[in-house]
Image (spheres, helix red, strand yellow):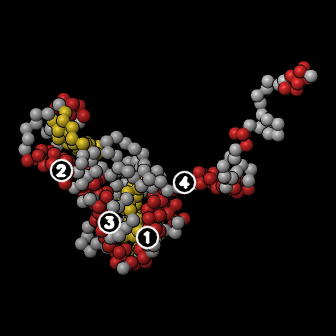
Amino acid sequence: MAGNSQRRNRRTSNKKGATVGSGGQRRRGLEGKGPTPPASMRKGHKKNRVANAQAKQAARRPAPRRGGPKGTNELVVGRNSVVEALREGVPANTLYVQQFVDSDERVREAVQLATEKGLNLMEAPRPELDRMTNGLNHQGLVLSVPPYDYAHPEDLTASAADNGEDPLIVALDGITDPRNLGAVVRSVSAFGGHGVVVPERRAAGMTASAWKTSAGTAARTPVARATNMTRMLEAYQKEGLMVVGLAADGETELHELEALEGPVVIVVGSEGKGLSRLVGETCDFRVRIPMPGGAESLNAGVAAGVVLYEAARRRA
């Protein structure tokens, strides 16, 4: 009897696995996996396939984007130039001051303005400033200006649409003087335009000189860069804009042009050569500005200002 009792109480297995009835699953294996993801995120679901197709289509479409090719920082050198740039609000990031420089009113004003604007102040030995400026007469002051953040041409029409307005844009063809670009930016701002487009190559860019000429309006008037001016104008035409080129031998006089009342891009060529051939052929209208005084042409800034005034008058 004792032997039978011992056999009944003896363990038949030393296995420490799951208990009978658990189906062989440990407790953690039965824990939930969280909420069910939406249909658009479940692989194989119809909505997931649609979402993936839309994402691929968006990736192929050239969406509006900020920024153009990035260059190196521009340097403004010389006491007068640096002070003028700081007064006009040129978006600089660092002011370099020569060690042991003979301080005068311009040096003190430059340091004060840079401090007020929160710019970096760096003291550097003269040989270092000579190296930075390639030996230019910097007079102990060098201002570093970061590359301008160009818009994309599509940004300008998008901005007009956001405001419920017909686009009014100026495109510059062959303008190489940054002061002319700054003057055009100033006129576009004054007459309610939506921005300026310049070619990516062989054209004036938004340098410190252009910024100063704009009298600060460049801070609120975007400048875009176009890789190919002709294709950019054709893209604007597809969006419904009329392309108006200014030409001394234009077929239409400015006061006759009703297109200025609607969505329009005004193309201004260089003072000497005017519009390039392909750009001129792309224009819907070639317009001349009557000049009773007999002048052969106007510079880009003045010509753009005259046409922008006429557009603003008609729209008002």
| Res. 266 visible in picture | no
Q: Residues within 10 Å of mark 2 (few under 14, many from 20)?
A: some
- Which of the labelled discs sits on residue 189, or is there none? 3
To which residue does mark 1 refer? 163
Q: Residue at x 10, y 36 (%)?
A: 101
Front tag of 1 and 4: 1
Residue 125 horizontal/vertical position (percent)? 17, 31
- The amino acid at mark 4 is Pro
To which residue does mark 2 refer? 113
- The amino acid at mark 3 is Ser
**Quick one: SS at disc 2?**
helix
**Quick one: SS at disc 3?**
helix
* Marked residue nearer the N-terminal end (3 or 4): 4
- Which of the labelled discs sits on residue 62, or is there none? 4
Residue 155 horizontal/vertical position (percent)? 45, 60
- Which of the labelled discs sits on residue 131, or is there none? none
* Marked residue nearer the N-terminal end (1 or 4): 4
Q: Mark 1–mark 4 contact, CB under 8 Å?
A: no
Rendered position, 222 above or below 10 = below
